[in-house]
Amino acid sequence: MLRKVILPTVLTLLAYGFWISEDFKEISAGVAIFLFGMLALEQGFSTFTGGVLERVLRKSTDKMWKSLSFGFTAATVMQSSSLVSVITISFLSAGLIGLIEGMGIIFGANVGTTTGAWLIAGFGLKVKISAYAMPMLVFGVVMVFQRSKTLKGIGYILAGLGFLFLGIHHMKEGFETFQNQINLTDFAMEGFAGVLVFTLVGIAATIIMQSSHATLVLVITALSVQQVTYENALALTIGANVGTTITAVLGSLTSNFNGKRLALADVLFKVAAGVVFMVTLQPMITVIESIALTIGLSHDDYTLKLAIFHTIFNITGVIIMVPLIQQLVKLVSAIIPEKRREQAEPIYLLESALELPDTALEAVRKESLHLFDNAFEIIAHGISLHRHDILSDVDLEEVSNQQSKKIEIDIDAEYEKNIKTLYNEIITFISQAQTVMTPEQNEELFILRAACRDIVEAIKGTKHLHKNMVRYISADNESIRAEYNKIRLFIGEVLREINAMKLVRDDPTSILSLDAIRLEMEENDVTANGMLEELIRKERITADMATSLMNDSAYLYDVTKNLVQMGEALFASGDQGIREAERSLILDDDEMEELQRG
């Protein structure tokens, strides 16, 4: 409802401003061109996020200083903390980074955006940048129409920079002529009341334009032609920094609880810094004057002094918050707790993850692992083994021989509760993600979809096993009891081995352990190895037992085969090329038969 009111109001005020002032029209056009340039710049950089940025992110955030450096570098290069925020929330929601790493990137990005203020104040207002804008626009537009994804991305970046420069030029020109008609400094306010009012104006302007960078450029250009006082400009800068949190908040609306926690941390970070600087603005002005004198700035170079203030604002915020980051994590986790779910729901399949192909792919992989984790307990209880026994170092053979008491489980109900909805959501998400994928990435999606199907089939096979399993593991007949304990033991060992692969996913050789499981599957086939025939011939089991064992041996083969195929898909490590190489090392059916004959 509020949005329906705000947009018509803003449009009406703009139309009125255009009607009463040509100079206001030029300033507004400058802002619009600048914002369009930022959109083009973000579009250009998004073109290059199909793997490179994501892989760098994963390797560059394992320590706080690396997270801060990554955020600083990304925001400096892109000149957009908004894009960095969206990517960071997307990756956090997909489970590629933790909340602390995400906070480090956001904090670093805030410092990185200060380079823009220096460029505008030190270069943009002292050089006729419109002369640079025109060639950039021409070359950029030509490249945008090329088929090559790389050329198109470079074209968007060049066009974006051209529009940024052109927007700054028009804002500066508009303010210079505007001062002949009206002097905005007549509305200046001194004291804390002025700080408060202009901070709120800066917040409102940033929320409306969805860009602190645009607000800052507007403030710097107005300050350069003395249309706003220095002290009020500093207050507007505080407001711009606080107002930019709206980007993270909006970006988190489609994310999971971790994405919302990161957005809240960004709000707390900016608001805390804003309050501190509002209260200490006068002492801070003295500090800025001292720094300006030290580096040789003239007394009236207020635009560069504003750049100094903007830098100190963000760096001080980081210095204050980084030592308190653990406490901040606890605070945002307490405010936004993880919801308890009656039915399994997706954790990583979020709309924000679809914005980047690699993020969408990793979200599917993470959600597939979530599906396997849910299936693990169903399969374990289906063969009357406890999950904690399988995950421990205890001797499973001893456990299976000693524990003859069945574990009560309704596999159909557990499937409905913990598997069905999750599986359907993964399939739906994959169909949506396919539209933004390369052929190679779509092939990987197909492999992950097959892995999820294998998980479901393994549960169905376990359901068929369960009926006779609970009947025979406590039977008086020692032979049939021993055979069903062997089935329990083998499935338990397969689950244990797959879990070990999950824990050492970065080891490319771990996937080769699946070959040993596949060989053992063939050796444990009671029909093929003659064990069933021997048990019948020696009358150790009845005909009814023999029929059950023969059928369940087939189900055992299906369950383990599906689990092995799932492991091959989910636990290959590294990037796509490495994963394909690892999978190619796994023995195929012909090689497996040759090994068995040999």
Image (cartoon, helix red, strand yellow):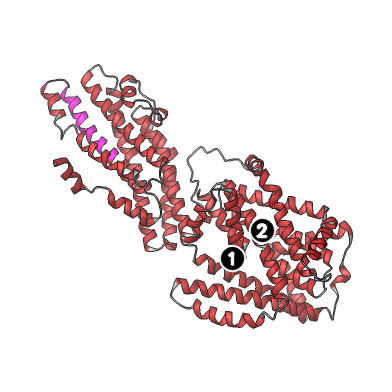
| Element carrying mark 1 | helix
Please indicate, yes or no, whether residue 203 appears anywhere in the rendered image. no
Which quadrant would residue 445 be assigned to in this image? bottom left
Instruction: Say left or right for 527 vs 47.
Output: left
Q: Name the quadrant of the C terminus.
A: top left
Q: Residue at x 74, y 77 (%)?
A: 172
The vertical placement of 571 against 495, above or below, is below
- Residue 540 included in the magenta stretch of the image: yes
Residue drawn at x 32%, y 38% is 460
Image position, residue 498 (x, y; %): 36, 39
Residue occupied by mark 2: 111
Q: CA distance from mark 1 to mark 2?
A: 12 Å
Residue at image position (83%, 66%) is 230
Q: Which mark is residue 372?
A: none
Residue with the mark numbered 1: 77
Task: Say which amino acid is labelled 1.
Answer: Val
The boundaries of the magenta stretch are: 538-560
Q: Tell me the crowding category of disc 2: few under 14, some 14 to 19, or many 20 or more residues within 10 angstroms, Cα based.
A: many
Front residue (pair 442, 101): 101
Measured as percent of width and height from the top left, residue 594 is found at: 16, 45
